Image (spheres, grey):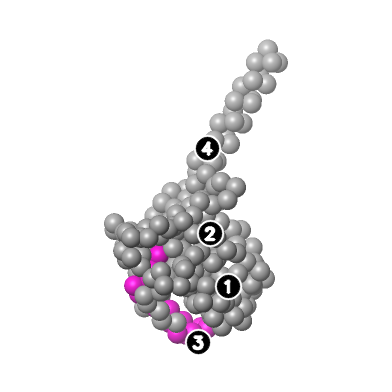
Amino acid sequence: MRIRVMVFACLFCAAGVCLRAADAPRGELLELHSCQLYIGGCIASSESTQEGQYLLRVWHFADGSHDDTLLHGLTVALLEVSDQNLATKAARPADSIIYLPQSATVSQCAALVDWLKAANPEVVHTRVRTRILPIEFSHHGSIVSFSAGDTLQIETTPFPPCGLVSCGEALWYTPRSTVSSYTVGVTSKAVVCEPMLALKWIDHGKNNIFEGRFGDDVPTRAAFVPPAFACVAANHASHE
């Protein structure tokens, strides 16, 4: 009888672990940098010390919950600024703002902030403020769009066929966020106008955004999917 109880207890615990794993937040990530990520060495070297002080990350939750609060369909964003290049792992932000969706409930907003801070512990050591704005996220075909009111606007496209290859394009950085897979896209539009940081950051036509997935089964090392070039073999070494 005692053995039977122990077996049922083990099965119950295993089921609980499976339920928690299945309930883990997961979805799509955009990670926009103010320096280029997949580019020739000549450009990467010139930008490494002069650019990269701004970073905008967007998490769109396809499913899952946090603190027993459903996050399905919600989107949260984090804007960080620094005097260092935030594309490098050792760099630390000096100031940050969390953008919460106007459509979320009070409990969902609290869960989003708690999840974001747990997933990005460096935020705890910075000045963190929050803003609630109407947020929209869409993924149609190869085009990904995000907006938070008039403050944040992003639209990404894949690399064009026979893209820039004159300077030996390669991956120079990896995402700061925890992801299971990612690639580099091109920002057809990137607008950040944040009065709380006196920041106006506008980019377009640059290889400065990671597009990936979070919350899936995370391998030891996230899988990088090189941009697809129609006339160039994209099998470049990674540099960190």
Left or right of 63? Residue 113 is right
Q: CA distance from mark 4 to mark 1?
A: 36 Å
Q: Nearer the viewer, mark 2 or mark 4?
A: 2
Q: Nearer the viewer, mark 4 or mark 1?
A: 1
Q: CA distance from mark 4 to mark 3?
A: 44 Å
Q: Which residues are magenta?
A: 185-200
Badge 3: how crowded within 10 Å, few (<14), some, or many (20+)? Answer: few
Q: Quadrant of the N terminus?
A: top right
Question: The disc labelled 3 sits on which kind of residue?
Answer: Ala
Kindly indicate the quadrant of the structure image that contains residue 200.
Answer: bottom left
Badge 1: how crowded within 10 Å, few (<14), some, or many (20+)? Answer: many
Please name the residue shown 37% across and 77% down the image: 204
The residue positioned farthest toward the bottom in the image shown: 198
Question: The disc labelled 1 sits on which kind of residue?
Answer: Leu
Q: Position of residue 40 (x, y in %)?
A: 48, 72
Q: Which residue is mark 1?
A: 86
Q: Which residue is mark 4?
A: 19
Q: Which residue is mark 2?
A: 237
Above or below: residue 94 compared with residue 157: below
Contact, mark 2 vs mark 4 (Cβ under 8 Å): no
Q: Secondary structure at mark 3?
A: loop
Q: Secondary structure at mark 1?
A: loop
